[in-house]
Amino acid sequence: MSDIAVSAQNMVKKFGHFTAINNISLSIPKGSIYGFLGPNGCGKSTTIRMLTGLLRPTAGEIEVLGLSIPEQSEALRLKIGYMTQKFSLYDDLTVNENLQFIGQIFGMTAQQRKQRLDEQLTVYGLRNLQKQRVSGMSGGQKQRLALAAATMHKPELLFLDEPTSAVDPENRREFWEQLFDLSDQGTTILVTTHYMDEAERCHRLAIMEAGEMRADDEPEILMSNMGVNIVEVKANQLRALKDKVLQRSEVRSAAQLGIRLRILINQSVVDPIGWLRSQFPELQHAELTPARPSLEDVFVSVTGEGRQ
């Protein structure tokens, strides 16, 4: 039996003359959390819709949980959960009624629904809200309900399309703890996001831009393989300094973070701090410190002007 939950080769999706997805290949192990990071419109949601069978690819081969997609997409739907970016349950039903309805959709018996409903109410902290109409719930409560509904039938594979875009940081953190619990139990999770801190939590990450995959690896490996050294500068007139350093070919990018300027310098420069002081006289007495790479650095490095 294969340890790969999702295998896709050379996926292409065109809408008329527009290429939304261009030659993407994936291999996702079972039980892992795989992230798609990228700006709105880069193709993250389109990729997920092809993997679920909701969209037919223009070209390429897709196998999900041993099923050929889209030919066997009907059989796949009983094995997957899908949580949309926009809350899609019924506002005029209670928490209990929504979960009961989802259980019926997936053909669960009354006994199965009763047992599973009890489990979900406990796991997702919804027991005291089970008779609450959804219309009166907060964003974080709705998010927990949406995840409870998406996992009601114990799917082998869970698709999450920017699931935390409407909740606060505390609820996002709690949500990710629940995802790690699901992964630990063997559920494979595919999640799209444009939050860097969320992307760093994934076991493996694809960075997408304009329908293409720019990078694909474990977040730590992506950060360690950037080929740059990072220096943070605390000095006066950072905006003017940024314009000056960006004119140098040795500098990959520069971005202001509060009172510091974060500069990415090619590793061909052996002593980046010494080099900055020698090239920019205004930095002779400034505070310069080396910094750890971040996913935002990786993203800037492999997309847009960072690839020039």
Image (cartoon, rainbow, N blue to C red):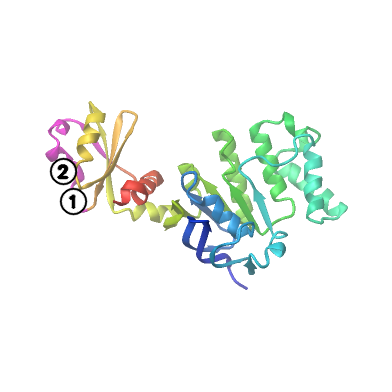
Q: Which residues are magenta?
A: 268-290
Q: Is residue 69 left or right of residue 270?
A: right
In percent of width and height, residue 301 lies at 34, 49
**Residue at left offset 20%, top offset 47%:** 249
Among the two numbered marks 2 and 1 on one chain, the one whose residue lies closer to the N terminus: 1
In percent of width and height, residue 184 lies at 61, 55
The crowd level at tag 2 (other Cα within 10 Å; few <14, some 14-19, many 20+) is few
Looking at numbered disc 1 in the image, what kind of residue is underneath it? Val
Farthest top residue in view? 236
Task: Report if the CB atoms under discs 2 and 1 are less than 8 Å apart.
Answer: yes
Q: Is residue 161 left or right of residue 264?
A: right
For the question of whether residue 303 can be seen, the reply is: yes
In percent of width and height, residue 113 lies at 82, 50
Q: Secondary structure at mark 2?
A: helix
Give yes or no for residue 173 being in the magenta stretch: no
In percent of width and height, residue 100 lies at 81, 46
Q: Which mark is residue 149?
A: none
Q: Which mark is residue 275?
A: 2
